[in-house]
Amino acid sequence: MDDFIIRAMIAGLAVALLTGPLGCLVVWRRMAYFGDTLAHSALLGVALSILWGIHPVLGAALLGLVIAISLVWLQRHRDLATDTMLGILAHTSLGLGLVVIAVLQSSGMRIDLNAFLFGDILAVSQNEMWLIIASVVTLFPVIGWIWRPMIAISIHEDLAKVEGISVLKIRLVFMLLMAVVVAVAMKITGILLITALLIIPAAAARKFSHSPEQMALIAMLLGMIAVVAGMMGSLQWDTPTGPSIVLAAAALFFASRLKKRS
């Protein structure tokens, strides 16, 4: 097997390990739109990183952090619903990102926009592979730290406050985690499809799980199966790899709908 395929497989499987438990939290908190907002903002982060000469993953992560902190600040003003604020942030950052990229391209700079929008996992370099692995090693303990508090917040936020959980701090850490994971994973499925890798395996896992931890483990397993199946299908039929991974995850989800809840 070629080296680039091995690197891509390792990177994809590592990302699935992160998106599994985080996706479960997103599903429980009904924050799929927040994932979309971070994904849209990642394009602006990529554009600014090219402009400033830094790594696109770093630029996307930093912009995601700004969006997450902005959302926490905006949520303190109750005159707008959260989904409205997310819509404003998502489309503003996407529009600004496209404008910045257009300006850069008009100045003679060549930018492969499709690679960022739809992913290019087969082009993952060795350094990028190690970056993704390092992200898994670094972020997994943080996910473990917020896991129980996030479950408590998802069940009943006011009761979690009474139990002494710092809801604002835990929510902010969760949002920052999401921002970093979106930035790291955009190379795999692309900016437009990263939310699917977060949501679909977690949604499919609900049919097979009886506890939060079991759901997280099954979501990770289904995400890894989707990565392998999508890559194999892409190589077999010469289809785009990122979208193929998403379609494999979708197939697993629809297959899970056939199982009767025990």
Image (spheres, helix red, strand yellow):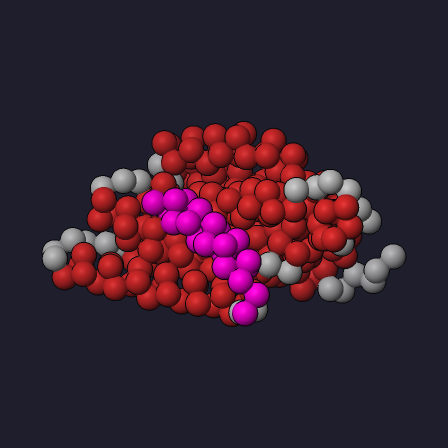
Q: Which quarter of the figure has residue 196?
A: bottom right
Q: Mark yes or no: residue 70 visible.
A: yes
User: How many numbered discs sit on the rendered protein?
Assistant: 0
At a point 47% along the width and 43% down the height, the residue shown is 180
Query: Per the image, is 160 magenta?
Result: no
Quadrant for the C terminus in the image: bottom right
* Magenta residues, start to end: 59-79
Q: Position of residue 183 (x, y in %)?
A: 43, 46
At a point 83% along the width and 62% down the height, the residue shown is 260
At a point 47% along the width and 68% down the height, the residue shown is 87
Q: Position of residue 25 (x, y in %)?
A: 65, 50
Q: Mark yes or no: residue 182 visible.
A: no
Which is the main secondary structure of the residues drawn in magenta? helix
Of 237 and 240, nearer the camera is 240
Q: Position of residue 22 (x, y in %)?
A: 61, 46
Q: Which quarter of the figure has residue 61?
A: top left
Of 8 and 31, nearer the camera is 31
At a point 72% along the width and 47% down the height, the residue shown is 161
Of 71 and 245, nearer the camera is 71
**Left or right of residue 108, residue 192 in this image:** right
Work out whether 262 lies above or below 1. Answer: below
Query: Per the image, is 72 magenta?
Result: yes
